[in-house]
């Protein structure tokens, strides 16, 4: 309804440029979390409750928004414009809402935690998987560094600058060696959630590698979407029934994707029988 | 730190296009609020607690982020990229955080309220003010319609379809007349918060119209920003001291802007003495 | 070299958003060609010299810019920003430069012909082929209409309005029938250049359908590009040696693409022996 | 006309992001002009014929497109999308078309000269003028360097590397001194076209500084455009009558803009009487 001479201001709006038929990844980053960690005394190098809160918020977002396929990577072929903010905004809302469950003795106080979001379009499955691999490699590198750094401080009684200096130029195997020889710590025995991060997805019955034709799946994706409406409705219902799980798996190797073909095909799998 | 062969995926990122030296307006819209209103039984046509919650969230966001000048309109001449999501995300966080203050007897349950945000750049003061005027005209038109519509239903015992049909083609004066003749209601006496909406801003000492050289102010804005660092620090401190107020004023006429020159100049005014 | 206080103006530049690893299509449209056709008396419905000039300009552009693969569709995985303007600009330059070859008796006079360009990224082979199919279907529909329309005028002595009215609501088979029954014209016998348009590409030895593994080709495309420099140099040389041809073929069916696998693989084929 | 199942490919198009009510600057750069200069033997450091050709092409473009206000800077408040390519494309067309007038004895041969274009939106008059100033400062710095460099080579018999080495770290006054003391050349006496570059604009009667209210002009620009259609038609006619001139003036100082208020107001001035 045109209601005033001021309405011309709408012409200044610009839609986001998100390309159809691509894998849309929304990357969510906490802002000012260094301050936040200090304020609420998060444990170093990893605070299990804080990680659980992040994962619970991610699960809640995926429950609200069935289009999201895996972790923070999502693929939505239709109208993409209003997606970006909503995801980040919904994530922030759940983070604040669920806070008291994970930190019952520490009420939130302003300034509240806040998150930035970036939406990136990946044209091919390979590009999207490489994005996930990039994040997991990054998680590994950071966690190995942080684990060694904080062990040097907490158990080795080094200062922060000293620890930083000590680690300068070290490779992965050096850090493994430091942890093992100095502190009798085997990095491989660290919790998977710290080493691999968390991947969140709908859980269907796993598929034996080889039994699923992945090539066909990729071809299907290349086709413009013309699924019947009924099929889409059925898919939606099956998706709503699926349990959303948080796991700490290797997403770089093919195995993760081969055994969960629904992640690339966007077709819901078989709901596993509970036994 | 370049850490893997996967890092090329960063090249797919695209920054938001926000033009420097413009008035950046971030418009925040609740998504699926029709459902939310029903779920929590918001009063019709206006729920005072829900409006107060929105205003409290807006105030909290402006407290966290001193760059915001007025309401949802903000002007930030430097690096603009990460702003959009953070505003919406922060707003969502406060909305959820403050919910229990305004609805103590109705705990929030998933799906949580969520908000979309749109950032629009306005090159001139006139364009930005026209945007504000557009929103306020819209608020007036909607509120007059809703007030009449719900009065017809709540006091006139009409059904929704009947009321809609009854109002089809009516002008503002017709709706005023319906309210007055049928229900002895003077629309002018309705609360300002319903008729004018809410404008949130930092409060300094008002300036007498005429005493402030607005033209100069506009010219200043046209100048590329080269304020000294100290001056910027001082401004930041004065801004932090200012009280943020929620008012229900006419923002279409010049008076609102003439008496609050700090809104257009982005220079903090004089902190009023408390008496 | 930072050379003055004015240099901040560079921060207002925004790069084009072209997504890597996609098929980049640059669509070039003549502007104001209705006036141009009248000014230089182009024949209706098709002016062979004008079409030949367009094709000659396209060939010249593809000779200058080896990245272009086919017709106006081109795929360039590296830095995409400066491409858009250059293609259109180069096309305009050749169009003007070659004009006198095709219209030796009609010198160009201002205002000169000018062209608009639009760059569109297509994420999958299927999307890109659908774009080509869309253009060819459009060419067919327009040419059948124009041929019938101008035959009604030129041979049927109708006026323009009368012919337009006469054709309103007719289907393809109706237009075919009008041409045949009224004017003893078989549309199928019209020149292929009018019915199919022109496709411009580098010519290598054709491949028997079935002998080439297209699926593999598509997979290759999904891989991030990490060809060795030497290979790239060799490819460039073979591309430079290839003859660029203008043909009037069906690009909708698979056959065109199956027999010319170099179009989708971006790997130059075998230079045919001249016999 | 929706004509086929392929038409969905249109949804992949993205419009350019050009903000309304801003000063649109289209910057045109020759690509590969180093090679071009060598190929056609352009004189060093400045080839007068090549500069004249550029200016003639710019004049021709401004004659075709009355929206362009000055040089390569143009302001068009309405629909901006198709502008970018057309300007560059039209410039290329005229460059090629006019080549033979300026280089009658050197026919153009492929690869033809080609141009890139960048469109940048400037929100304020000050930003736009700073852009122009930036270009003119750049022209000055480059020309002083090139003049000294080539004089060292052509008259001082230095090699290119030697001259480069000789000039490393020199300031403007040093280069002036080198030219004067070694070659008895006063840089101030160099042609204005080399020192200042060329500015192209419509010529109306000059206005005495002080007699025109520039502040009002800027205010007018801030107003949303709602000129009557008749007025717009009249303006268009007056613009078409105005002579387009190429001058070599200082565009950094206020004087240039104060005496030609039509450049900032976008209202055509008074056509000077020919005497």
Image: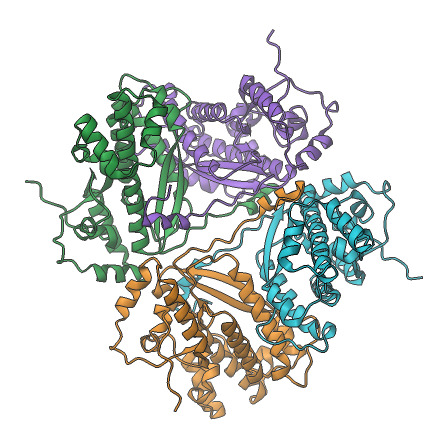
Chain colours: A orange, B cyan, C green, D purple
B160 vs D8: above or below:
below
Q: Residue at x 67, y 42 (%)?
A: A4
**Along the line of sight, the residue nearer the viewer: D255 or C249:** C249
B171 vs C36: above or below:
below
Question: Image check: C178 left or right of C8?
Answer: left
Residue closest to the far left: C275
Q: Position of residue C218 (x, y in %)?
A: 26, 59
Q: Position of residue B234 (x, y in %)?
A: 77, 57
Residue closest to the far top: D275
Q: Quadrant of residue A32?
A: bottom right
Q: Position of residue C106 (x, y in %)?
A: 30, 17
Q: Position of residue A153 (x, y in %)?
A: 57, 85
Question: Image check: C96 left or right of B206?
Answer: left
For the C terminus of chain C, the image quarter is top left
Q: How many marks?
A: 0
Residue closest to the far right: B275
Question: Image check: B192 left or right of A12?
Answer: right
**Along the line of sight, the residue nearer the viewer: D81 or D214:** D81
> Can the viewer see residue A21 in this picture?
yes
**Along the line of sight, the residue nearer the viewer: C8 or A208:** A208
Q: Quadrant of residue D134?
A: top right
> Can the viewer see residue D40 in this picture?
no
């Amino acid at each position: 309804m045109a209601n005033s001479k001021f309405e011309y201001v709408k012409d200044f709006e610009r839609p986001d440029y998100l390309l159809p038929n691509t894998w849309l990844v929304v990357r969510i980053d906490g802002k000012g979390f260094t301050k936040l960690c200090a304020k609420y005394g998060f444990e170093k190098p990893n605070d299990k409750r804080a990680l659980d809160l992040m994962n619970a918020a991610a699960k809640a977002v995926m429950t609200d928004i069935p289009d999201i396929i895996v972790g923070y990577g999502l693929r939505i072929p239709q109208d993409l414009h209003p997606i970006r903010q909503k995801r980040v905004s919904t994530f922030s809302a759940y983070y604040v809402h669920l806070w008291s469950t994970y930190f019952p003795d520490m009420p939130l106080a302003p300034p509240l935690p806040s998150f930035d979001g970036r939406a990136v379009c990946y044209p091919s499955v390979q590009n999207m998987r490489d994005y996930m691999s990039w994040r997991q490699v990054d998680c590994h590198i950071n966690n190995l560094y942080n684990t060694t750094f904080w062990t040097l401080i907490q158990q080795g009684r080094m200062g922060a600058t000293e620890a930083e200096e000590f680690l300068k130029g070290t490779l992965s195997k050096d850090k493994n060696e430091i942890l093992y020889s100095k502190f009798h710590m085997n990095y491989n025995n660290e919790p998977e959630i710290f080493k691999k991060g968390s991947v969140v997805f709908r859980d269907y019955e796993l598929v034996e590698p080889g039994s699923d034709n992945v090539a066909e799946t990729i071809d299907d994706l290349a086709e413009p979407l013309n699924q019947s409406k009924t099929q889409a409705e059925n898919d939606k219902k099956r998706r709503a029934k699926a349990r959303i799980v948080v796991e700490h798996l290797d997403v770089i190797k093919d195995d993760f994707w081969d055994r969960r073909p629904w992640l690339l095909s966007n077709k819901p799998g078989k709901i596993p029988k509970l036994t």
